Amino acid sequence: MASITLKNVIKRYGSGKTANQVIHGVNAEIADGEFIVIVGPSGCGKSTLLRMVAGLEEISAGDISIGSRVVNDLEPSERDIAMVFQNYALYPHMSVFDNMAYGLKIAKVPLDEIKTRVDKAAKILEIGPFLQRKPRELSGGQRQRVAMGRAIVRQPQVFLFDEPLSNLDAKLRAQTRLEIQKLHRELGITSLFVTHDQVEAMTLAQRMIVMNAGVMEQFGTPEEVYTRP
Ligand code: ADP
Ligand code: ADP
């Protein structure tokens, strides 16, 4: 687990006259183990902010720290983060086990340890019976759980969720939301969760960052955010 600090974080796309600033100096301190939801309308910069924390997008100015380390110049693989995407991004030709194990194999984690971690994650997510199946043999909800499993086995300090529920139907969305809450209760990993859905934000967030047009307009508990005039 780790804290996350955003210090006057700015993002511009392009340069010179055509430069377009899309994140305008965001400051936030996120504590160890907090579940933070970044919410706001399409195009407000949620995904850009998350991708900068992940290292998938360079920051134009400011500092991002994870724990006590400034991570501005670190590759995604050096940041101790794991990301869950909307489109699952599973490898279609690999079994569920291999999908979950892939990153660990690359990182040269011993096979015994990989099996232990995959089994533990599979148990938490209740996907044990599907470990030998291919992604196409799973339902959307099961695939999403595999995507989360793949993130868990990395034992990251931080989870980054990029609208992971938006491709699911209403029933599955509610179910997966409960699973994410359970996961956070059990593992307590500092989490940043991006969504444009206010209900989702309110149900999941311990605190929420409300973005609008690249500006952080509010940062507080759902109660604080929704009782503010
Ligand atoms: P959100 O996730 O809230 O929908 P984004 O972070 O995707 O918003 O986008 C914020 C703004 O940055 C938008 O105006 C978008 O058009 C712009 N943007 C996103 N990615 C790029 C890019 N690669 N190049 C130029 N502009 C981009
Ligand atoms: P693209 O979106 O360009 O297809 P990917 O999303 O596959 O690329 O990966 C982009 C970068 O993000 C790569 O450097 C990869 O190592 C990293 N990455 C991919 N998946 C994860 C993950 N679950 N957790 C952390 N980093 C990841």
Image (cartoon, rainbow, N blue to C red):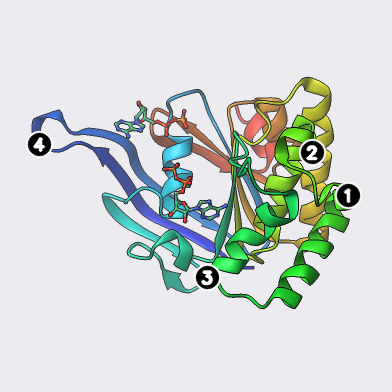
Q: In the rendering, at what x and y percent does residue 20 appear?
A: 23, 31
Give the SS element for disc 4: helix
Instruction: Residue type at mark 4: give it.
Output: Gly
Which is closer to the viewer, label 2 or label 3? Answer: 2
Pick whichever of labels 1 and 2 is earlier in the sequence.
Answer: 1
Q: Residues within 10 Å of mark 3 (few under 14, many from 20)?
A: some
Between 30 and 20, the residue placed more toward the observer is 20
Give the SS element for disc 1: loop
What residue sits right under mark 4 in the picture? 16
Instruction: Residue type at mark 2: give it.
Output: Gln
**CA gap, disc 1 and disc 4:** 51 Å
Whether the residue under disc 4 has CB within 8 Å of ligand 1: no
Q: In the rendering, at what x and y percent does residue 94 appear?
A: 66, 48
Q: Residue at x 83, y 64 (%)?
A: 120
Q: Quadrant of the N terminus?
A: bottom right
Give the SS element for disc 3: loop
Q: Quadrant of residue 174?
A: top right
Q: Are marks 3 and 1 in contact (CB under 8 Å)?
A: no
In the image, taking residue 207 as reference, residue 186 lies left or right, namely right
What residue sits right under mark 3 in the picture? 67
Q: Residue at x 35, y 62 (%)?
A: 72
**CA gap, disc 1 and disc 2:** 9 Å
Q: Are marks 2 and 3 in contact (CB under 8 Å)?
A: no
Q: Are marks 1 and 2 in contact (CB under 8 Å)?
A: no
